[in-house]
Image: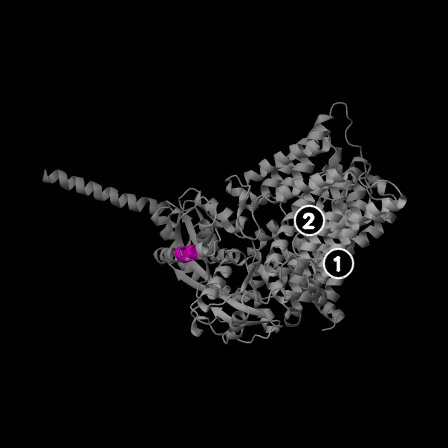
Amino acid sequence: MAKRSIVLVSVSCLILVLSSWVPAQTFPEKPVTMIVNLPPGGLADLSARALAEHAKPFFPRPIIIVNRTGGTGTVGASEVIVAKPDGHTIGISPVAPMVVHPQRVDLPYRTLDDYQPIIKIVKGVLVLAVHSGTPWKTMNDVLDAAKASPGSIGVGVGGLASIPHLVLETLKDRAKVDMSVVPFGGDPEVTPALLGGHVKAAVILPLSVAEHAQAGKVRVLGTFDVQRHPLFPSVPTFSERGYDVTLTAYTFAFAPRGTPEYAIQALHEAFKKAINTEGFKQFADRVGLVVDYAGPADLRRQLESDWASYGQLIRVLKLK
Amino acid sequence: MDSLQGLTHGFGVALSGQNLLACFFGVLAGTLIGVLPGIGPIGGMALLLPSTFTLNPTTALIMLAGIFYGSMYGGSTTTILVNVPGEAASVVTAIDGYQMARKGRAGAALAVSAVGSFVAGTLGVVALMFFAPPLAEVALRFGPPEYFALALTGLIFLSRLGGGSAIKSLLMIVVGLLLASVGMEPVSGRLRFTLGVVQLNQGVELVPVAMGLYGIGEVLMIAERTTGIPAMIKVKFRELFPTVAEWKRAVFPMLRGGVVGFLVGLIPGPAPVLSTFASYALEKRLSKHPEEFGNGAIEGVAGPESANNGATAAAMVPLLALGIPFAPATAMLLGALTVHGVQPGPLFMSQHPGIFWGVVASMYIGNVILLILNLPLVGVFASILRLPQNLLIGLILLLCLVGTYSVNNSFLDLYVLVGMGILGYIFRKLRFDLAPVILALVLGPMIEKSLCQSLYMARGDFWAILSRPITATFFLIALAWIAFPFFAKLFRGGKI
């Protein structure tokens, strides 16, 4: 009896060891396809390409980048969600298509359980910029003007229910002011509208206005983050002036639901090493992004908290 | 820096061995991408983007820009030969270019298209060099209300391109606008007419619609009358190039096309497509023989083919002078520069004169290389038409299917292609003009988006939009255009 149980235990141990060991050996079996849900040349695409490039020394197989664009990122994300969950198809996406859009429109993914976070890569901090023809020199000038005549200031954002829009709404709520939202199709449309004075202000990525701020065409008056942005060290953050708005537009990698843990781990390890290379940090500096690491568990916690806060904004603003 | 001094400096940069090679490689890749229907400059540039990470920014930009403007050269090859518009900017060429080919003048059409591209491309670079900053300032005066007025006026003006019944054109516009409304609504992101198919979230793509309506539709027409029909007219080699009379007719359309293309090209969005429609409409109006348009008028090829190259050069203006991409292709160029830590903007020309003037100079060189590359190819391509008709049909089908699939790797696009092919066949049978469908599909999203944005800007006040000077001018012109035929008839004493 005792003998039999020893045999049983050792056999089960062997099976356990084998089952956890064999598959880990076989990932990756082939090149990994990394689906980017936004067009080539944009910041999400460039981040994905830089990530794949710098992960080369740490990952045994090639990483192939495929752009599947459209539907503000939901088409490419859906393609990843329905892919075979073996770790060989993964996605790179900014936060909005993964956390905001599934709460607004009907998509193949409806909850955070429909995909597995792998790693958070970079964050795009947003700033409030105003046209140089306006009299506003500080953050408080704008907020006072908005208080004095509610709704009169048109603020350009990258799209309805985009992260810049939700950041603006949060600011309006925290500062108890009213400004009008003017939604565009991303920063490349917001910048000319701001420069031409068609909107007086914008919530926008630093890189989209850095050159124009240097040339004196726009003024950057506030940063939405806990710390000041390296491109604008003299510009205060909203939180240091008492308005707690620190939502950022971060980009992360994810896999379809049911992807084996060893594949997630292998990808996470390689990507973590990649974003810590000098080359990747240099890339992020140049494009005005900030390297922002979080592992699968921490990323999942952040996604959950963002899911809740964005969901509440969507309900309050009736953006559904 | 003085322009000419800058240009001399630029040629010094562009003529270095490495940059010259990059320029040649770029325009060669561009030509190939242009000739192959489907895969456009954006796809080609995306493929080569990572390889430019190791180059210096000037070389990278020279190569990628070469792909961009190079792809506009060969773009109409399949359009002229077999009625398959590989890019949206070639759709207008299908009207007269294909008719020329059927009359045995394919070589002439291709040659005029190559020379026109060169003329307009070079004119465009000259304008870019001297006027980029002031032109960019003008472009900034256009906000959403101006785009709305412009796009709506454009739709009204250009929809009657093929002549014929106004009601039929209007119906075709409705078809195009309906197709344009599929997918995510451009401002709010709500889904429309997607029937639960996720791939439709991105809307109906332009390439499968154009290839289906024209290419597949044409195949069905040929298949129908194939019995007893002689093969395409054989082209003798000495007849490949345009006659003196043809050159004379083509010169002014090329120049006008270049100017129209450049001006339209300063608008964000689908400028190359719009520029070809605008140039065609202009040539038809100015022509002494408007009845020839639609039956193989060389002006109808020379104008639009030049216009799309002018538009490509103009697309570099907001990119280099403001650092703002107005089109997906220039967004790629911007991306390539940003990863090198170079951010184009108002200070770009003074801070990075080497890159700016180097690229401008390389565009002169690139256009010359493109002309030398493309003219000998005319004979090669024209000889395709010597194939027997049954083989040619297979070839056209293959081009359409592979070309469509290559854009997005999407099976849905193939269904759209086939569906549009059948629709194209029916429309031809009923003598409907196909161009308004494409025009409405291009302009529909632009009209909708800019109207929504204008209303957000004006907080719902329509009058605030109409009373902006540029907007009001556009609308007055459009009104006059609509009202003119009625008054003309009234004055002649006829019935309305």
For label 1, the residue is B473
Residue A170: in magenta span:
no
Question: Coloring scheme of the render?
Answer: one colour
The part of the image, by quadrant, that contains residue B55 is bottom right
Residue B339 visible in the shown view: no
Chain name for mark 2: B
**Crowd tier of the residue under label 2, counting other residues whose Cα lies within 10 Å: few below 14, some 14–19, many 20 or above:** many
Tell me: residue A208, above or below residue B220: below
Residue A310: in magenta span:
yes
**Residue at position x 76%, y 58% from top?**
B122
Q: Position of residue B396 (x, y in %)?
A: 67, 35
Tell me: residue B392, above or below residue B285: above
Three-letter code for the amino acid on which mark 2 is drawn: Thr
- Describe residue B338's horizontal placement relative to residue A257 as left or right: right
Q: Main secondary structure of the magenta part?
A: helix
Q: Which residues are magenta?
A: A306-312
Instruction: Report the front residue among A114 and B339.
Output: A114
Residue A77 visible in the shown view: yes
Instruction: Report the front residue among B372 and A281.
Output: A281
Cα distance in 3D space between marks 2 and 1: 40 Å
For label 2, the residue is B31
Q: Are marks 2 and 1 on the same chain?
A: yes
